[in-house]
Image (cartoon, rainbow, N blue to C red):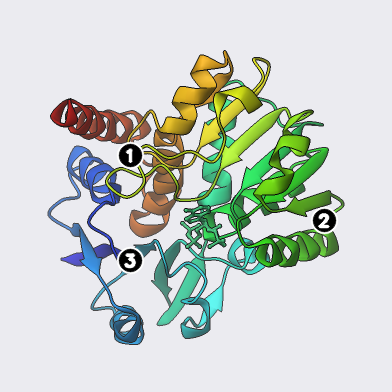
Amino acid sequence: MKKLYVIGDPVDYSLSPVIHNAALKTLGLDNEFTYDQMKVRKEELKEFIRKVRTGEIIGASVTMPYKEIIIPLLDELTTEADLIGAVNTIYIKDSRVIGHNTDGIGCIKTLEESGVSINEKKVIILGAGGAAKAIAYTLALKGVKKLAIINRTKKKAETLAKTIEQKTNTIVYTGNFDLLETVLKDADIIINATSVGMRKISENQTLVTEDLIHSDMVVMDVVYNPRVTQLLKEAKKAGAKTVDGSSMLVYQGAEQFKIFTGRKAPIKIMRKALLEVLDENSSKKN
Ligand code: ATR
């Protein structure tokens, strides 16, 4: 069996196993590959990578809080991961452990699927962690007009903005949440790339409320569980277009699946499996 995992700490919230296992089963690959979640503590990360290097494990999805700190432990980064400075996928190639990032492409595909054009748009990204980095770089490379990165820790937003400006032609504004009201006035798209709003952790919280959202905005959340986060509820009340995080999970996972198995991912099956679990979760709560 070729072993695949999603690693993080905590990791039990992750629904990556749902989409990958649905895909493996549908393509009849479940007798060749297994995909499970594994809680890996920081001090165990090195040992996990060693097992990938020896081929005992053939790859993994990487989630919080390891997207950045895993980098020095890897043998090589793909162009995307190197540019972004964060990794959400690791795999073995010629006995070397490669780090890659599919979050940016996942975000772009999600917006495309929702009919949202990013060309010449003013985009606000909330957060400056691994997911925010991938999204910010990819949007900057794909031609957004103005980018604002708003983060609780302003310094992290500033560091990210500086490197994006060095590597792309996009001008990036930064600030903490005090600046939010000002930048929101003329924003077209707002993307929450923080963990705020996650089920069981901060489910009823949102960094942006209805009064700050305009009806002609697009509001996207990277948080996918619950599917309709508090932010998206506020956006709906304000009459804005909403894009939930489920598509991004599916698209970033589909890109990983191609790398792990060499096969095209069955997107519709992955989405169906994910939505079933999310709907089940939300009915359990009510
Ligand atoms: P990921 O890899 O999923 O992006 P991360 O790198 O740990 O996760 O980043 C989490 C992001 O969520 C950060 O931008 C973090 O803000 P700080 O840089 O200030 O820590 C943001 N975040 C987490 N909890 C938050 C909260 N309660 N309020 C505001 N921002 C929060």
In the image, what residue type sits under mark 3?
Gly
Q: Nearer the viewer, residue 35 or 44?
A: 44
Residue 26, position as x, y percentages in the image: 20, 37
Looking at the image, residue 12 sits to the left or right of residue 205; the answer is left
Q: Secondary structure at mark 1?
A: loop
Q: What residue sits right under mark 2 in the picture?
A: 168
Q: Earlier in the sequence, mark 3 or mark 2?
A: 3
Q: Earlier in the sequence, mark 1 or mark 3?
A: 3
Residue 172, position as x, y percentages in the image: 81, 51
Q: What residue sits right under mark 1 in the picture?
A: 225
The mark found on residue 255 in the picture is none
Looking at the image, residue 42 sits to the left or right of residue 97; the answer is left
Q: Quadrant of residue 86?
A: bottom right
Residue 240, position as x, y percentages in the image: 59, 18
Is 138 drawn above or below residue 241 in the view shown?
below
Instruction: Report how far apart the C-alphas of labels 1 and 2 lie in the structure.
Output: 32 Å
Instruction: Report how far apart the C-alphas of labels 3 and 2 lie in the structure.
Output: 30 Å
Report the residue at 23% width, 78% height from top.
Answer: 56
In the image, what residue type sits under mark 2?
Thr
Q: Secondary structure at mark 3?
A: strand
Instruction: Report how far apart the C-alphas of labels 1 and 3 lie in the structure.
Output: 16 Å
In front: label 1 or label 2: 1
